[in-house]
Amino acid sequence: MSTSAAGPWWRSAVIYQIYPRSFADGNGDGIGDIEGIRAHLDHLSGLGVDAVWLSPWYPSPMADAGYDVADYRDIDPVFGSLAEAEELIAEAHDRGIRIIVDVVPNHCSDAHPWFQAALAGGPDAPERELFWFRPGGGPGGDRPPTEWVSQFGGGTWTRTTNPDGTPGDWYLHLFAPEQPDLNWDHPRVRAEFEDILRFWLDRGVDGIRIDSAALLMKDPALPEVVDGAPSPFVDLDAVHDVYRDWRRIADGYPGDRALIGEVWLPDRERFANYLRPDELHSAFNFDFLGCAWEAAALRRCVDDTLAAHAPVGAPATWVLSNHDVTRHVTRYGRADTTFSFATKREGVPTDLELGTVRARAAALLTLALPGAVYVYQGEELGLWEVEDIPTELRQDPMWGRSGHGRDGCRVPLPWSADAPPFGFSPDDAVRAPWLPQPAEWKDRTVRAQTGDPYSMLELYRAAIGIRRAEPGLGDGEMRWLAAPDGVLGFARGAGFACLVNLGGAPVPLPPHEARLLASGPLEGDLLPPDTAVWLRTAEDPAAGPTSAG
Ligand code: GLC
Ligand code: CA
């Protein structure tokens, strides 16, 4: 796991996101756990990923699937124990796989001892200073302090009841009421999280994914949100000091420890500020994740992404799916192939066959672009968004508050067998998987796809294998090649080219020495629509007679 000549691992890594509830269930209670992850490390090695990011595994009442943390220094019993987590880190390292844990600093759980003390101690409890407690407005204080809208829909304030039973102050939660926001102006909050970082870095983790990284600081005047005015809670300048402190901590450890921000910001320059050399190492590229399956839009997104990262010297990242968004097999099969929370519509018709063909091409596109790539568990199996989960089985707090939920991308993985639970749980499991799996996934299990050269899984294995061996891939430069309308073509290193046909008609391949990998069948020397190919080319393919369309 040494740092190669190409620079530190996080500049080039393929990072696999494990959503622990849904990866593999070792003990048969229907919920994924550390035992299940440890039993499936072969899958990760076989895929060839460099690192694993684990969504939260800490003790939690699970009001937001673990993003409501009650204790940042332990493991929830549903997932296992701290000792098992340490074993997992060691076993992954033995296989050359790095581990990234998810730290949630914007808010904790309402079950966290600080918040419990803040409630129990009444209005004068010193712990209230660690959160955002405020009196309500209007006579009787029965109006929330602001009209801010929660990220999950609904208001951002919940009124408390005083220990004597009288109605009390309100507290702020940008997400669910079970996720009170912490007050990052308070030195105790800062010291606590620095200690939490050290706790996990001491245990050998290679990276920290920082949840809701742009939301930590609030304008203490708590103004209303006004169009055109700076937000009172998104991307306040003072947040950068937090990450400068964190960077010093990460830099104090041996090896390359990476800080990776979940930063959703429309302004690319503001986004890149988080990646200045003394701040975070890397951040998720959500513009790409929301981008339409169109040549011009993708090209613009790639160009803008690289242009935004260049001045701060940070590597780009490429993300197609995660545990919060519509799986891209489903997205790419729709008439509108963009994603945004505001326009997310479950049940809008989708052509899964088309979505799958495009997802295959998208895999080759992303794995060839400069920088690091995230693969969300199940993406390598071609899983689609499950949009017909019965309402009574839905778990996501977003469902109900906003009319859409994220359960559909969190359905437990299919590993083997012809029927649910598809090897997700052991044969003698006492409970069914926590969300129901579609019967059609029998063709998408790891076992069904293994050895099938046309499967999504074998495509990912082959592509990641080539990426590892190909010096021009990962971090570095890229060069657009002249290509017909609707076609993206670019060169990497010396003698590697990627072509993606997003147009409606087959196009001729440029001159090449060999075909390394294609996302679908070619028609002789023609690249069909929605298909990508990796080519071995002469050293300078741009010099070849590629048509400019
Ligand atoms: C992030 C997580 C999401 C969670 C939210 C609140 O956006 O990815 O799953 O609900 O933060 O912690
Ligand atoms: Ca379990």
Image (spheres, rainbow, N blue to C red):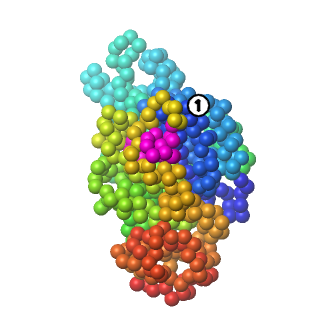
Considering the whole magenta stretch, tell me its main secondary structure: loop
In the image, taking residue 487 as reference, residue 515 lies left or right, namely right
Q: Is residue 244 visible?
A: no
Q: Position of residue 357 (x, y in %)?
A: 41, 64
| SS category of the residue bearing label 1 | loop
**Residue 411: in magenta span:** yes
Q: Residue at x 39, y 16 (%)?
A: 162
Question: What residue is pinned by disc 1?
Answer: 80
**Residue 318: in magenta span:** no
Instruction: Name the residue nearer the viewer: 6 or 526.
Output: 526
Q: Residue at x 65, y 39 (%)?
A: 88
Residue 139: name its quadrant: top left
Q: Position of residue 428 (x, y in %)?
A: 52, 32
Please say if 383 is above or below 154.
below
Q: Quick one: which residue is furthest to the top in this view?
A: 164
Q: Residue at x 34, y 14 (%)?
A: 166
Instruction: Name the residue nearer the viewer: 454 or 358.
Output: 454
Q: What kind of residue is marked 1?
A: Gly
Give the magenta part as a residue range: 406-425
Q: Quick one: which residue is furthest to the left in this view?
A: 139
Please say if 515 is above or below 100.
below
Q: Residue at x 69, y 49 (%)?
A: 95
Instruction: Name the residue nearer the viewer: 534 or 431.
Output: 431
Q: Is residue 293 visible?
A: yes
